[in-house]
Amino acid sequence: MIKEFLLERLSWILFIFATQLLILLVAYLDPLLPLKPILYIVFIMTLLFFIFLILRYNKETKFYKLLKERENNFDSTDLTKPETPFEEIIATSSTEQTERLKRLASQNKTILEQEKDELLSWIHEVKTPLTAMHLIIERVEDQKLKSGLTYEWLRIHLLLDQQLHQKRIRFMENDLHIEKTDLEQLLFDEIKLLQSWCIQKGIGFDLQLDITEVLTDPKWLAFILRQLLTNAVKYSEDSDITLKSLKTNNQVILQLSDSGRGIDPKDLPRIFDKGFTSTTNHTDQSSTGMGLYLAKKVAESLHIHIEVESTFHVGTTFTLIFSKRNEFIDVMGM
């Protein structure tokens, strides 16, 4: 703050020094003026000026120090009471701007909440005809036609589900319900959802579940598994997807491995980025780049660490590592 203070007062400081030099110059050029007494007076005045600067520094920078160090929030109460007219102008302007931003933020939040509620309502409304459509498809006798309709129905269902969870994810802490979850049943339910698609692509599942119970939120864990399984089925053909659970170092680990096209090494660091699809396959118009991003966000809230290993054109393995102990366990007293 000393540097800023000196730069702010630089013109005044230069003016004082210029006047002192002018007095000395006049005394030097005019033989009628005694040089030594004037030199002594200039020295005293310069010394007093430095003392004055030190005293004014503490007084004039107090307000600005607090202004510089204050937190970046809408709370203006941490400012000291302004002591000068200029400080009063700054404090008033800052308070007015803060109040205006508060009102604007509140209005935007209300609008976003309304849009979210409207979208969620729309999604729930769409689910009704979608369920009816599925029942109609089940009665179709032409197996080829039935398979195609089921696949398109599943795509719509998964996109709606992804959109629903995307809107809820910002408030998922209010929706979490941590409990002992049957991992095997959860996987069976998700595999059953994708059954028709898997049959169409000749994909089977190999379950090797040494551990069948985890402590988590079943609904949100199901969403993570749905994204990973959907990706595995989408990029695989005529092969098996292996699901393996084990326990090591008191941590439950779930691995999902496929023999699909794999991930290009240069894409691997970016697969969890929002909106990222691929740098090698731009013809895939059905990919939104949101599935793995949302899965990662949900996993962070559930304290699940996701790792991925992939060999291009060979296959990919996603690993979910559940926490040993976390705040969920402490809250439940387990």
Image (cartoon, helix red, strand yellow):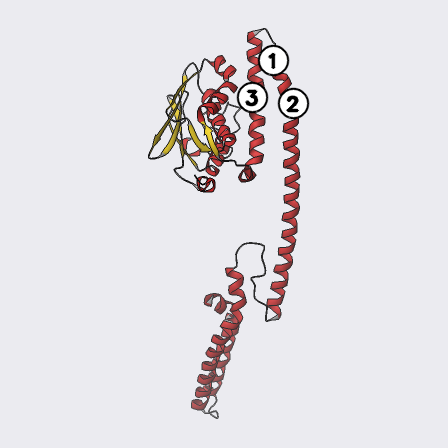
Instruction: Say few, some or many: other residues with alpha carbon within 10 Å of mark 3 (under 14 / 14 to 19 / 20 or more).
Output: some
Q: Secondary structure at mark 1?
A: helix
Residue on which disc 2 sits = 128
Q: Residue 251, image x and y in percent?
A: 37, 34
Front in this rendered view, residue 217 or 304: 217
Which residue is the extreme one toward the front? 333
Give the mark, 1 or 2, whose residue is nearer the N terminus: 2
Residue on which disc 3 sits = 155
Q: Nearer the viewer, mark 3 or mark 1?
A: 1
Q: Residue at x 47, y 36 (%)?
A: 302
Q: Residue at x 49, y 78 (%)?
A: 52
| Three-letter amino acid code of the residue under disc 2 | Thr
- Is 2 left, or right, of 133 in this rendering? left
Q: In the picture shown, does residue 237 fall above or below 46?
A: above
Q: Secondary structure at mark 2?
A: helix
Instruction: Say few, some or many: other residues with alpha carbon within 10 Å of mark 2 (under 14 / 14 to 19 / 20 or more).
Output: few
Distance between the Cα atoms at labels 3 and 1?
14 Å
